[in-house]
Image (cartoon, rainbow, N blue to C red):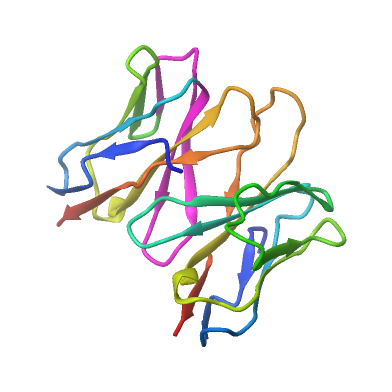
Amino acid sequence: SQQGEEDPQALSIQEGENATMNCSYKTSINNLQWYRQNSGRGLVHLILIRSNEREKHSGRLRVTLDTSKKSSSLLITASRAADTASYFCATGPMDSNYQLIWGAGTKLIIKP
Amino acid sequence: GAGVSQTPSNKVTEKGKYVELRCDPISGHTALYWYRQSLGQGPEFLIYFQGTGAADDSGLPNDRFFAVRPEGSVSTLKIQRTERGDSAVYLCASSLGLAGDSYNEQFFGPGTRLTVL
């Protein structure tokens, strides 16, 4: 079963604009991660945020986590055509150091 | 290359046939995972190996699915009597397999697209 739900399901923006994707989950977590999947390629790990962290940055990526609302957001600033991909959030449960529970993803299209 | 590799990249088979999907993890990674991903969905966990043993096979949908990792490196996912509903991308991932509270980042292969006609 899938725990995370990404919102929106699809997002289309102009190159240079910022893209925001949201993820909600149901149970207590140890960490939350965001992955990118390009068409025909495997999943690439983008960023991990632990349950005791509220915000994390990596290059043009900014992730926030609100454990009280069981939600996270991924912001991509100054988007580029190469950012076109599907983005997934995956949660790591409290009682496991290997399990990941995935959402259905947000399909992001960056228009040149 | 140093990443996770999977073969074949595409497999087309007929209903009722047997298939094997192979995964070569990153050298030194003791943990290996199989997932299944249907179109428009996130990955669905199938099985997790720590070394040679299946530490968690709770995601295998039924007894037609079986996976092995005899030497603690390469793994093979085996599907017997394939059904059309088995069509999906099968993803393999590996990680260091550290114990305790250390989180183990998973590195994914490109997947095998299985089509059952």
Residue A75: name its quadrant.
top left
Name the residue furthest left: A14
Q: Is residue B72 left or right of residue A57?
A: right
For the magenta stretch, what is the residue range?
A29-57
Q: Position of residue A17 (x, y in %)?
A: 15, 40
Which image quadrant: the C terminus of chain B? bottom left
Q: Is A7 above or below relative to B36?
A: above
Q: Position of residue B83 (x, y in %)?
A: 51, 76
Q: Residue at x 70, y 58 (%)?
A: B25
Q: Residue at x 53, y 65 (%)?
A: B111
Q: Position of residue B93 (x, y in %)?
A: 62, 53
Viewer can see residue B110: no
Tally the numbered discs. 0
Viewer can see residue B114: yes
Give the camera-side residue of B117 and B33: B117
A74 in magenta: no
